[in-house]
Image: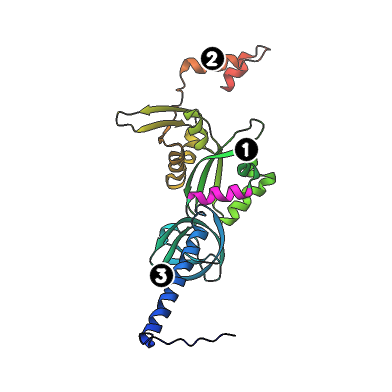
Amino acid sequence: EIRDELEVPTEFGRMAAQTAKQVIIQKLREAERETLFNLYQDRAGEIINAMIQRVEGKVVFVDLGQAIAIMPPSEQVRSEVYKPGQRIKVLLLSIEKTNRGPEIMASRSHPNLVSALFTAEVPEIAAGSVVIKGIAREAGSRTKIAVAATDPNIDPIGSCVGQRGTRVQTVITELGGEKIDIIHHDEDVVKFIVHALSPAKITSVTLKEETDGKKLAVAEVPEDQFSLAIGKSGQNVRLASRLTGWSIDIVRAEQPKITDDSVETLHATSLPEDGSESLIKNNL
């Protein structure tokens, strides 16, 4: 055992010790912030099971386990009520460095939340056999999702729906009962617009590209399908426009006019084989 007495410098007083302590604590906090940032920086776009920590005004703070994420009003669903202790699934939007540590933004209303939920629920999407081509969403109300299959032997819509609708029902339950329309993506713009406007039946679609680059499609529908094509407060046609990238106008299809000649033709084709023409004329 060797002992060597060291003289304590005079500048190592109380103030110097306090300063050293503060510097060490500061370095530890910076290292902790850097660790949290590295932990979440590559997880943007992922779904995380989280718990609501607190609600301050209109801002919701979500506990991710090792960090706290912020969910502003723009990323919330209006129909949802958030309570402390409630467990939900959130989508990580972005992670940015700040002086107070990493700022993590979470969302419940972003369209990519639906995409991530389907990816987690449908193995064909995770494997790449089924591809999500586009999503149009009005959070809390309705979503339209366009899918296509890279393998011709796979039904993309059936894969997303699942047996007896189990797969899509799981996603709907997680979104609080939000309606989901799964449509088939088609490279033919006309067919894609027809699919996007489902469940309404479309008679014809006319494409018009204006000089300013605006894309306009005029869809003709039967009289009884007009309100269905537009949807409640224009929701169906609005989501179809977002999904396809075309501005869509819904017009009523012109009904063929009934003339005397067409009536006579109809009567003639309705004559029975026994020649009882007088009976039909009396009935008419």
Task: From the image, give the main secondary structure of the stretch colored magenta.
Answer: helix
User: Which tag, 1 or 2, sits closer to the chain's start?
Assistant: 1
- Measuring from the top left, give residue 237's x and y in whole percent: 44, 40
Q: Check contact, mark 3 vs mark 1: CB within 8 A.
A: no
Q: Nearer the viewer, residue 127 or 5?
A: 5
- 214 vs 173, left or right, is left
Residue, disc 3: 57
Task: Give the amino acid type for the residue marked by disc 3 in the picture.
Answer: Gly
Q: CA distance from mark 2 to mark 3?
A: 72 Å
Q: Residues within 10 Å of mark 2 (few under 14, many from 20)?
A: few
Looking at the image, residue 232 lies above or below residue 69 = above
User: Which tag, 3 or 1, sits closer to the chain's start?
Assistant: 3
Looking at the image, residue 43 lies above or below residue 195 = below
Q: CA distance from mark 3 to mark 1?
A: 44 Å
Residue, disc 1: 129
- Measuring from the top left, give residue 261's x and y in whole percent: 48, 14
Q: Check contact, mark 2 vs mark 3: CB within 8 A.
A: no
> Element under label 3?
loop
Specify the label residue 265 is tagged with.
Answer: 2
Residue 104 falls in which quadrant of the image? bottom left
Residue 251 falls in which quadrant of the image? top left
Looking at the image, residue 148 lies above or below residue 263 = below
Asked if residue 118 lies in the magenta stretch, the reply is: yes
**Residue occupying the point 67% across, 44% down:** 162
Task: Give the amino acid type for the residue marked by disc 2 in the picture.
Answer: Thr
**Residue occupying the point 42% across, 27% down:** 206
- Measuring from the top left, give residue 273's x and y in whole percent: 67, 12
The magenta stretch is 111-121
- Measuring from the top left, give residue 110's x and y in whole percent: 47, 52
The quarter in which the C terminus is drawn is: top right
Task: Give the amino acid type for the residue marked by disc 1 in the picture.
Answer: Ser
> Element under label 1?
loop
